[in-house]
Amino acid sequence: MEKIVLENKTILVTGAAGFIGSNLVKRLLKDVKGATIVGIDNLNDYYDVRLKEYRLEELESLADSIGSAKQGDKMGHFVFIKGDIANRDTIDNLFSKYQPQVVVNLAAQAGVRYSITNPDAYIQSNMIGFYNILEACRHRSTYARSHGENSVEHLIYASSSSVYGGNKKVPFSTDDRVDNPVSLYAATKKSNELFAHCYSKLYDIPTTGLRFFTVYGPAGRPDMAYFGFTDKLLRGETIKIFNYGNCRRDFTFVDDIVEGIMRVMQGAPERKTGEDGLPVPPYAVYNIGGGQPENLLDFVQILQEELIRAGVLPKNYDFEAHKELVPMQPGDVPTTYADAAALERDFGFTPKITLREGLRKFAEWYYDFYVKQ
């Protein structure tokens, strides 16, 4: 493994106004000295744009508080660009201007069910967008090597536990075959891994894919179950619990995801030459998951207790009257369960935040953001 020093580097984070992206930028601003963080996001309306604006405001406030220059100034700690990674000119211009040395691609069209009804969004963002990032990394690295400049040292990108599809073997290991996706979203994420392997092999670009397992936390995505359940319960609506509650999810709190990303950013797959004289692809894929799948009914029980504790819902709320057990929906899977042994082996990290701790933080944030106001 090749050690990557983040201090005083230019780091590109795509999807910087997204749930994981904004939390990663926040951590980088706090912990990495002298770094210029370049964030890009198209701020699309897949979900409430106010949440994305809220996350951005937090980042800009943090950047200001640590003496950052204002938005758009290259010498500042945080530079935000409103743009779409699916636009080739936007990405090429960004790479030309800022010359990032570490790239974290978190921009993507998320959601399994949305991919069934809106496939175009997934092809544009997850396929073309990622291809644009890879091409920019390639051209930047080729130019930099021939001109004695800094090349792209490491590309980290978001994959997903969805690539495991309906695999029966658990826990899910990165050694498992993942050739049978059950949603277009999963297929695009698997394609990202294939693209990355190809570019690592052909152009000697170190790439690491991270398969995230059900990420949750404050200011998360409203299309995720914990967030959607809370919205509906607050409105007095009924929540649907799929597969009659016989689902298990490996929930991973966002701070654990960010810790994992931070560690992986600093350890790139080593460049080597094979027996054929050609580069052995500096390529890796890891799971980041809690390693402790929770039953959906237990999850709902903890969520309701924490919503009451935080004051989001009254103490006498009748949950039984607002729950409905229904069949599995298309594209979904009954179980996600991460084998994160490789992450522990190579980076000394395993997610540690319990579901109750994480849902408590979410419930407290939700009260402040939605109820208190």
Image: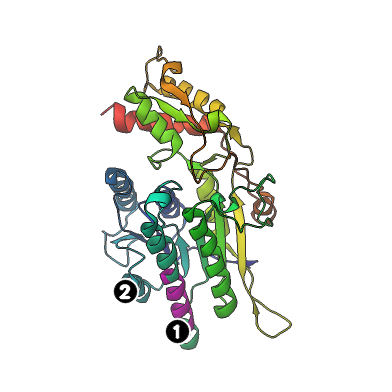
* Tag 1–tag 2 contact (CB < 8 Å): no
Left or right: 233 as drawn, with respect to 180: left
Does residue 366 belong to the magenta stretch? Answer: no
Q: Residue 73: give its label.
A: none
Left or right: 64 as drawn, with respect to 1: left
Percent from the top left, x then y, of residue 131? Answer: 44, 70
Looking at the rendered structure, the kind of residue marked 2 is Asp
Percent from the top left, x then y, of residue 354? Answer: 57, 34
Q: Residue 143: give its label.
A: 1
Q: Quadrant of the C terminus?
A: top left
Is the residue 52 above or below the residue 158 in the image? above
Q: Quadrant of residue 281?
A: bottom right
Helix, strand or loop status at disc 2: helix
Residue hosting label 2? 89
Is the residue 300 above or below the residue 199 in the image? above
**What span is in magenta?**
132-143
Helix, strand or loop status at disc 1: helix
